[in-house]
Amino acid sequence: MDDKELKLIQNGKLNRWTIENSKELYGIPYWGKGFFDISEKGEVIATPIRGQEHQTISLMEIISGLKERGLDMPVLLRIENMLASQLSILHESFNDVIKQFNYRGQYRGVYPIKVNQQQQVIEEITRFGSRYHHGLEAGSKAELIIAISMINDPEACIICNGYKDEKFIDLALYAIKLGFKCFIVIEMLGELELVLRRAAALGISPRLGIRLKISSKAGGHWAESGGDRSLFGLNTSEIIAVVDRLKQEERIECLQLLHYHLGSQIPNIRDIRAGVAEACRYYTELVMEGAPMGYLDLGGGLAVDYDGSQTNFRCSRNYSLNEYCADVIEIVIASLDEKELPHPTIITESGRATVAYYSVLLFNILDVGRFDTHCIPDALSPDLHEMTQNLLEVYKSLNNKNIQEYYNDALYYKDEIQRLFRHGEISLRERSLCEAIFWNIINKIAKEANRTKQIPVELEGIDVALADIYYCNFSIFQSLPDSWAIEQLFPIMPLHRLNECPTRKATLADITCDSDGKIDRFIDLHDVRSTLPLHDIRSGEEYFLGVFLVGAYQETLGDLHNLLGDTTIVSVRMNDDGSYDFVREIEGDSIAEVLTYVEYDTKVLLNQFRQAAENAVREGRITGVERHKIMHAYESGLRGYTYYETGCSNHSDNSSS
Ligand code: PLP
């Protein structure tokens, strides 16, 4: 729906607003992929289990449940079954295509721990994934420690990527000895000597892979992680050096896997196809060189269609999962059959597409900065300054033929009026009148601009200047770092009132009050919107929004800007009968916790403050009873949630000093 249609509906000129209008407006059928929808009641619902579409969970019902349990917003909601569904969809898509094309190898997925390392996520991936032998990718020693502790399936692969020191290599070798299907991927030539030395010292035969520095380049944010200039992987001469060295050591039988990673969020299937085709050539050559091989690891990159546009826009993807699987399998068959080589086990390290859907950030609106233009009084003093008169004239004679010219005039007069005020030539009252006239002009220009087909470049985005600001109870830096760092778009929408027409256009500001703590780019099927249609806030009623598809990368990259800590995390699991349980609750950081992260000793802080309070008692500025109350407030502050609390949080209690 375009802005004109929205306006007609808002003006009551089209049919009454229905949930169908909201679905279209917020694009939920396009990015929701069947996991999210809107109920008849006008609330966002989740359908976590594929094939059981009648079993839904209302996110507003979850919020009520959280409130009953004394949990404050913001909350990161994890819907467990969605992770299980995503894993099944991935494996079943590959397995279907394998059957369809008579592929003679297998598919094995591994989840890259870095995408969301939280214990619960890894536990669920290994638990749900065990029926598919889903493994883990470890990019560091810490991640390998997680992998070998959480996996208990000898068929599941563990892929060791990243820089490896002696301890990392030893741990990987011991994992092999213990029976894990663990691959040590050589990323840098120097690593090979260390692996050979440690393998000889420990008497363990290594299972080796090579990371290929692939020439194919992909579009999207992370293009640089692939291509000839990528930081990791071996070029052709280094690959030859590895092969020769292994042959010299009579260890060529250890080389079993070829890996590459084109980058994350690859929006264009053409790039994916090119990557697979190139990797197959290397794979074939390695087999011809005498390496047993058997595993082809295509890395990550399977994109998420965040805006639902199904295009090669960087926040989308122009292919379905089925197409991805079919293209991969087809290319591998074509390349290997040509040389009559056995089909390898195909591994993908899909992170984003596996976990993005699983988490939703829920938060409330704290306040609204409404953009309401003040009326220009009918009767104006005849003694107004000439510049004020000019500005008023612009307002009166503005029409759709002169918007650009009059916009320039209005800016000029506004600057002049500010100068006159600074020099004491006009009063505060007259300046305030001028401001009202100016914003009325901008409002009129925005309306005219919306009616014209070609908006002058300078006036593009004028809507944003007139949009309300909805102040949100969360930190972008903590919960949506990619929105700030790389302008990643996420679907954002109200969680309720979706059978009502949204009458306001808004941008969002977070609780940090940092000028970067804002969202003014929103998903749209054809473009990027600069404002989000929202409902007017009703007094005494809370208003809730959700940011969707935030399961990948956001938790890991979030930081403590303004000392706003981890949000509370709540997991729900849907049962077979359609009921659901709150299965886990991880309380968000308290203020005391975030203070210790930045090296404060809260006992020292408390003692210092207690001393200040005691001094105030001694000097007669407060009584002993007041000291008690003040200390209680301080201590309860330390225990409190770092976000805006509505007074019912679990964090605070009633103990006092
Ligand atoms: N594998 C490697 C080596 C990576 O560096 C990454 C992340 O960029 C991934 C897999 C995961 O990629 P994605 O989340 O796009 O699936």
Image: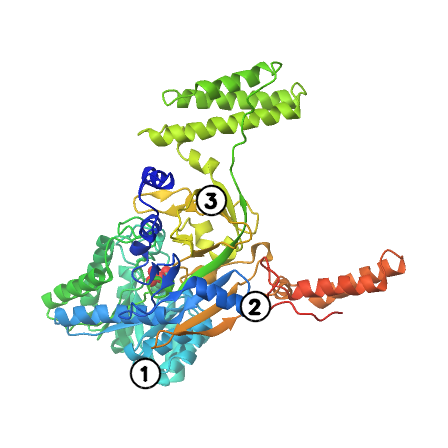
| Residues at marks 3 and 2 touching, judged by CB atoms closer than 8 Å | no
Residue labelled with disc 2:
70
Return the residue nearer the eye: 547 or 251: 547
* Residue at left offset 57%, top offset 20%: 379
Q: Residues within 10 Å of mark 1 (few under 14, many from 20)?
A: some
User: Which image quadrant: the C terminus?
Assistant: bottom right
Disc 1 is placed on an element classified as: loop
Q: How many marks?
A: 3
Q: Quadrant of residue 193?
A: bottom left
**Is residue 565 at least partly visible in the picture?**
yes
Q: Residue 270: x percent and y percent? A: 21, 53
Residue labelled with disc 3:
507
Three-letter amino acid code of the residue under disc 1: Pro
Three-letter amino acid code of the residue under disc 2: Gly
Disc 2 is placed on an element classified as: loop
Return the residue nearer the eye: 465 or 326: 465
Query: Disc 2 to disc 1, how far (Cα)?
Result: 43 Å
Query: Disc 3 to disc 1, how far (Cα)?
Result: 50 Å
Choose the circle earlier in sequence order: 2 or 1.
2
Q: Residues within 10 Å of mark 2 (few under 14, many from 20)?
A: some
User: Which image quadrant: the N terminus?
Assistant: top left
Query: Disc 3 to disc 2, how far (Cα)?
Result: 29 Å
Residue 154's disc number: 1
* Residue at left offset 65%, top offset 23%: 422
Coloring scheme of the render? rainbow
Badge nearest the viewer, 3 or 2: 2
Badge nearest the viewer, 3 or 1: 3
